[in-house]
Image (spheres, rainbow, N blue to C red):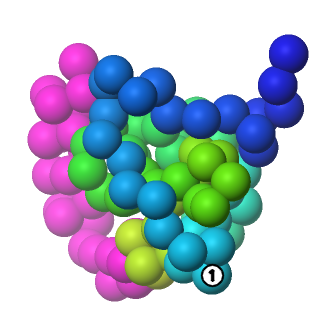
Amino acid sequence: MTLRDERRYPKLLLRVPQVPDDTWLSQPEAARQLGIALFRIGVLIACDHLAPAENSAGRAGVTITSVEAEKTWRGSATRRAKALRLLKDSIRFF
């Protein structure tokens, strides 16, 4: 059994770049910074709103840049933009 922070991305399903540790965040930390549930991180990755990455130890996470961009978008997007994004993401995700 592995801890959530020690999980890796499946190599066959997703090409994930390895990035320096100072440009990487774990998925739980990204969820905390965005103020969302952990499962939403997976949805944001699947919908191309967060960039998946592995740190030097091979742990699954996302890039800090993509988390910052998501924070900025969430802070400045109108209700209409959020509703449109939800519609598009719902269609793409399912």
- Image quadrant containing the N terminus: top right
Look at the image and tell me whether residue 60 can be seen: yes
Find residue 52 and report its horizontal and vertical position in percent. Answer: 42, 52
Tell whether 85 sits left or right of 30.
left
**Which quadrant would residue 80 be assigned to in this image?**
bottom left
Majority SS type along the magenta span:
helix
Disc 1 crowd, CA 10 A, few/some/many (<14, 14-19, 20+): few
Q: Which residue is mark 1?
A: 22
Tell whether 74 sits left or right of 64.
left
Tell whether 37 sits left or right of 88.
right
Q: Is residue 83 above or below residue 5?
A: below
Choose between 1 and 89: the one closer to the eye: 1
Going 68% across and 34% down the picture, which residue do you hit? 7
Going 15% across and 52% down the picture, which residue do you hit? 84
Q: Is residue 35 magenta?
A: no
**Which quadrant would residue 17 be assigned to in this image?**
bottom left
